Image: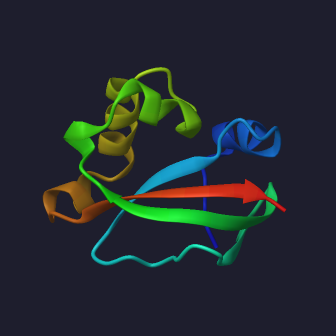
Amino acid sequence: MLLFKKKFLPAIRAGQKTQTIRLWKYRKMRPGQRSYIPGAGYIRITAVDQVQLDELTDEDARPDGFETADQLRAEIARLYPKQLAEGHQAYRIAFHLE
C-alpha cells in the first residue's frame, strides 16, 4: 500500500500524478507489482529507480505533481526529515491506475 496526503489524491485519480519519491533503507517495491492507494484505488508499479535528490530536474518533478525540482525537494524535506537525517536512499516509483 502507498499512502499519500489528501492533497495529491485528485491528481492521482486524474492520471496527472504518476510517480512518487520515497525514502527507504532498501527498495520495498518492484516493477509489475500491484498496490493500493487509499482514496485513489489500485495501481500498477511500472518502475522503481534509485535516484539522487540533488540530481532531480524540473522534468523529473512534473510527473510527481510539482513544477520544479526545488519544490519537490522541499516537499520531501518536509515529509521525510527523519529519513533524510538517517541517510535513507531515495527511490522514484512510477505507477498508473488500473
Q: Quadrant of residue 64?
A: top right
Given residues 81 and 55, the one toward you in this image is 55
Say if 50 sits above or below 17 in the image.
below
Tell me the quarter of the image containing the N terminus: bottom right
Given residues 63 and 72, the one toward you in this image is 63
Residue in the picture at 15% in, 65% down: 86
Q: Is residue 90 left or right of residue 35?
A: left
- Residue at the extreme top: 67
Q: Is residue 90 left or right of residue 19?
A: left
Tell me the quarter of the image containing the C terminus: bottom right
Image coordinates of residue 34 in percent, x first then y, are 71, 76
Image coordinates of residue 58 in percent, x first then y, are 40, 25
Residue in the picture at 61% in, 61% down: 3
Say if 19 sits above or below 3 in the image.
above
Residue in the picture at 47% in, 65% down: 48
Given residues 58 and 82, the one toward you in this image is 58
